[in-house]
Amino acid sequence: MLGRTLFCERLAMEHRNFYGRIKGKALNAAQERYLQEDLPKLSVAGISRADNPERHLLDMQQVAAGKPLWLEIGFGGGEHLVHQALANPEVQFLGVEPYVNGVAMLLGKMRKAGVRNIKLHMGDARDLMDVLPDGSVSKAFLLYPDPWPKLRHHRRRFVTPEHLEPLSRCLMAGAEFRVATDIEDYVRQTLQEVPKAGFDWLAEGPEDWRMPWHDWISTRYEQKALREARRPHYLTFQKS
C-alpha cells in the first residue's frame, strides 16, 4: 500500500487542489470525440484520489517504458507540451490538467501533429504526484499557473509546501524545474518557497529570468500577458 499519507492527513481534500473551475464553454463535436476516443488510451491508469486506501505507486515501466519522464503541470491548451514532445521524441511526457476544455484542445493538437509520446492525467496534480515513485521525473514545467491573486487564496497556489514537497520527491537529483509567470507576487512566492523544497535557483543575472528558454514556445497565456503589458518571468531551478 502507498506509504505517503502525511500530506493527506494534514490537508482536507477541499484544500488539495490548486485550480478553480474544471469546464468552460461547450465543447464542439470534434472535441467531444477526442475525449471519448483518445483520452482513455492516453490516461495513466492507477491514479485515484488521496482518500482511496488502495492506492499504490505507479509502475514506471508502464508509464515511461524506460524513457526519461518529463512532467508538465497544468498544460492549458497544450501548445508547449506538444512543442516539447515533437522536439524530444526520445522523452515520455506526462501532462496534468483538470480543465476539460484544455484537455480537449491538447488532444486535437496531438492528432494534428501526430504526437505519440504524451500521456495524460485529467485531474489534480497532487493525486498524480502522490503515486509517482521518488526520483522518477527528470524535468518538470509549471507554466503560467493560476495566480490566485486574493491573499486568502494564496494557499491554493502551486508554489506552496503542500505541492512543492511532493514534486521535489518525484524529481531525480539534478532535474530541472521551470516556472513561467507574469505575476510579480507569484515570482516572489516562487523564489521564497521553491528553494525551501530542495531546489537551487540557477539565475546568475537579470537576463536569466527576463529571457525565455532556448526551446520556448510562447503560449496563449503569455500572449495575453504581453497584450496587457505584464512582464513574463522565466525561472529555472535544479533539484539539489
Image (cartoon, rainbow, N blue to C red):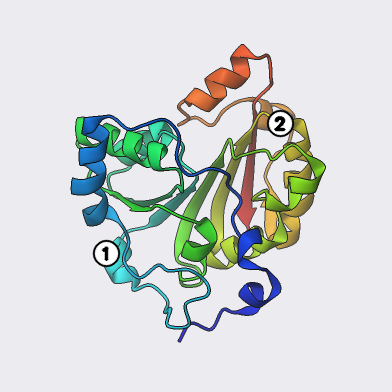
Residue at 40% in and 42% down: 100
Dividing the picture into quarters, in which one does residue 110 lie? top left
Q: Nearer the viewer, residue 34 or 183?
A: 34
Residue 95 percent location from the top left of the image: 40, 49
- Where's the C terminus, which quadrant? bottom right
**Which residue was labeled with disc 1?**
65
Residue at 62% in and 25% down: 211
Q: Earlier in the sequence, mark 1 or mark 2?
A: 1
For label 1, the SS is loop
Mark 1 neighbour class, 10 Å CA radius: few under 14, some 14 to 19, many 20 or more: few
112 relative to 69 in the view: left or right: left
Give the residue at the far bottom of this rendering.
1
The vertical placement of 10 against 85, above or below, is below
Q: Nearer the viewer, residue 97 or 202?
A: 97
Mark 2 neighbour class, 10 Å CA radius: few under 14, some 14 to 19, many 20 or more: some
Q: Nearer the viewer, residue 92 or 145?
A: 145
Q: Amino acid at mark 1?
A: Ala
Numbered circle sitting on residue 183: 2
Closer mark to the observer between disc 1 and disc 2? 2
For label 2, the SS is loop
Residue at 67% in and 28% down: 182
